Image: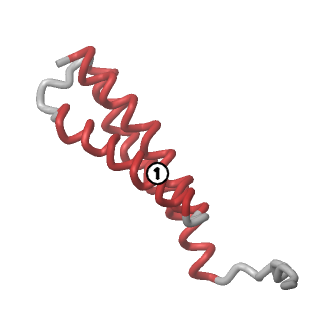
Amino acid sequence: MHRPIPKIKQKREKPDILVYFFSLTTPLFMVPQAVAIFQAKNALHVSLATWSYFLVADIVWITYGLKHNLKPFVVCHMFYFIVETFIVIGILLYS
């Protein structure tokens, strides 16, 4: 009978910290697009197809990250998904 191998808590290294930092902050760079759409009430030159594709892609990436236990990856794409959802809603309302 095999005993399960206990998990060893590892110290976070600089690359890990950078990955977490960028996973949390990179989606924030899409926020200005969402704000611009809702402030101007105009999404005429914003592509619904592109942003819808990003939404679908994020579902795939979130599923992949969950399956492989990639927490920063999942968090990042969840944030992307949230911001992209607002952008798609703005496009639907204002284009």
Q: Which residue is mark 1?
A: 77
Q: Answer with the quarter of the image where residue 44 lies.
A: top left
Question: Which quarter shows the C terminus?
Answer: top left
Question: Which quarter shows the N terminus?
Answer: bottom right
Q: Residue placed at 45% from the left, 47% from the top?
A: 28
Q: Is residue 47 above or below residue 13?
A: above
Q: Nearer the viewer, residue 67 or 22?
A: 67
Q: Residues within 10 Å of mark 1 (few under 14, many from 20)?
A: many
Residue 10: where, in percent of width, then height?
77, 82
Q: Residue placed at 26% from the left, 36% from the top?
A: 52
Q: Residue placed at 61% from the left, 76% from the top?
A: 16
Left or right: where does residue 57 sit relative to residue 8?
left
Left or right: where does residue 64 sit relative to residue 21?
left
Q: Answer with the quarter of the image where residue 48 lies.
A: top left
Q: Is residue 77 above or below residue 13?
A: above
The furthest residue to the left: 45
Q: Give amino acid for label 1.
A: His
Which color mode does the image show?
secondary structure
Q: Nearer the viewer, residue 75 or 17?
A: 75
Q: Is residue 24 above or below residue 54?
A: below
Residue 80: where, in percent of width, then height?
43, 46
Dot 1 falls on a residue whose secondary structure is: helix
Left or right: where does residue 75 sit relative to residue 86?
right
Q: Is residue 55 above or below residue 39?
A: below
Q: Residue placed at 54% from the left, 55% from the top?
A: 74
Q: Answer with the quarter of the image where residue 59 lies.
A: top left
Residue 73: where, in percent of width, then height?
51, 61
